[in-house]
Amino acid sequence: MTTATTPVSEHDLFSDHTLANTEEVYAELRELGTVVYLPANESYAITRYEAIREANSDPATFSSKQVAFNPQMNEILSGTSLAADPPEHGKLRAILTDNLSPRALRSLKDVINQDADALVKELIQKGTFDGMKDLAVAFPVSVVLDLIGVQGDKRDSILPWGEAAFNLLGPLNQRAQESFPLAGELFTWTHEDMKGEDLAEGSIGRAVWQAAERGEIAPESFGYLVHQILAAGMDTTIATIGNVIQLLAEYPEQYAALREDPKKIPAAVAETLRFRTPAPAFGRLATRDVEVDGTIIPAGSQVALLYGSGNRDEQKYENPDVFDIDRNPVDHLGFGYGIHGCAGQGLAKLEINGLMEAWLRNVESFTVTDVVPRLNNFSRPYDSMQVTITN
C-alpha cells in the first residue's frame, strides 16, 4: 500500500547493482523523496538524515522487531538487544554496555596499541601485502575473539560465520540462501554447544554467562548476546579499516596532513564512517500509521533506514560527496543513533584509532591497488586490496 504522493522506485536494496553502487543508488532515492516505496523489498526507505534520526528516536513507532528483511532472521534475532524494544532492550543492552563502556575498555588500550604497532611493523617488513586479510581482518578478529574469550579451533570459524550471519539480515536472496549453512553453525555453537566455562576467565563472554547464572538475564540470552557480539563486533570494523586505508591512499594530501597532526585521527575515522557507511541499511517495523515529511507509512510496514543515504544528505552536510578529514562529522550515522546506536562503537574506535596511530608512526607513504569488493547484504567490505609501502 502506498499513498498517492509516495514516490516509488524499482531499485532493490540488496541487488548486486545496489550493493556495488550503494552511494549512487541512495542518491537517486534521496532525489525522489524523504520516503520512497520499494516494491522489490516491500519496504518504505527513509533517505534523509533528519528523518532517520527522528525514526531512531521513536522506537515505539519504529520497532526493531523487524531489524532484518526476512521473517526467519527476525525470529532468530528475537532475544538480542539488536531486535528488542523497550523495556526489554534496556536490560539486554546493559549487559553489553557494562562490558563495552569506555571505562571497561580502558585497560585494553595499551595492549591494543602495542599489538597494532607490532602488526604494522611486521607488515612494513613485507613491503607488499593484502590490506584486508593481513591488516583489516587480522587485527580486529584477534582483538574481538580475545575479548569474547573464544579459545581453541573455534577461532578460525568465527569470521566466515559472522559474514554469513550478516548476509541473512537482508532478504532471502541467493546470498542469504548460500549463507544459511555457515550461519547455522554459528547459531548452533552459541545457542546449543557453547558453555560459559569454554570462554576465557575475565572475558566479556564469561561475564555474560555469569549474568545469566545470577538470573540478571534469561539463560537463553547468554547465547543470543554472545552471538550478537561475535557477528557484529568485527565486520563493520573490518570494513572501516579497509575503507580508511583505501581512502587515505586515494587522497595522499590528506594522509600527509594527518601525519602532520595525528590528533585528527578521530575526525578522519568519523569522516570515513560518514563517507562510506559500513552498514548502510537497517530494518524497522512501523507499529502505527506514521507521517514522515508528508508521506504516510502504514502500520505493519517494513521500513528501511538508509544510514548510508543520510550520511550523504546534502541538506545535512556541505559537499557530502567529498572526503574531507577536516569535516569531523561527529554526528554521522555510521554507528546508528539513539538507543540502538552500536554498543560496540567504543571498542571499534579503540581498535581503529590504535591501528591508525601505529600506521602514521611507521608509514610515510603507501599505495593501494587491485581493490576487489565483496558483496554482502548488510555490510560493505572489500575482499582484498594490495597495499605497498613506499617509505
Image (spheres, rainbow, N blue to C red):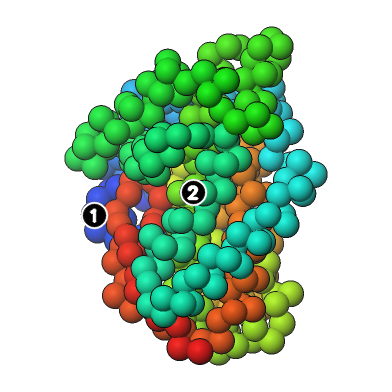
Q: Amino acid at mark 1?
A: Asp
Give above or below for 291 relative to 108.
above
In the foreground, 173 or 235 = 235
Q: Nearer the viewer, mark 1 or mark 2?
A: 2
In the foreground, 245 or 2 = 245
Q: Amino acid at mark 2?
A: Val
Residue 45 in the image, given as x and y percentages of width and height: 42, 46
Residue identifier under label 2: 141
The secondary structure type at the circle numbered 2 is helix
- The residue positioned 65% from the left and 56% from the top of the image is 112
Marks 1 and 2 sit apart, C-alpha to C-alpha, by: 27 Å
Residue identifier under label 1: 16
Residue 269 in the image, given as x and y percentages of width and height: 60, 66
Q: Quadrant of residue 117?
A: bottom right
Residue 64 in the image, given as x and y percentages of width and height: 52, 30
Give above or below for 60 relative to 49.
above
- The residue positioned 67% from the left and 26% from the top of the image is 207
Structural crowding at the residue carrying mark 1, measured as other residues with C-alpha within 10 Å and reported as few (<14), some (14–19) or many (≥20): some
**Residue at the outermost right position:** 103
Q: Quadrant of residue 386?
A: bottom left
Look at the image and tell me whether residue 292 can be seen: no
Of the residues under marks 1 and 2, which one precedes in the sequence? 1
- The residue positioned 57% from the left and 34% from the top of the image is 149
The secondary structure type at the circle numbered 1 is helix
**Residue 120, numbered circle:** none
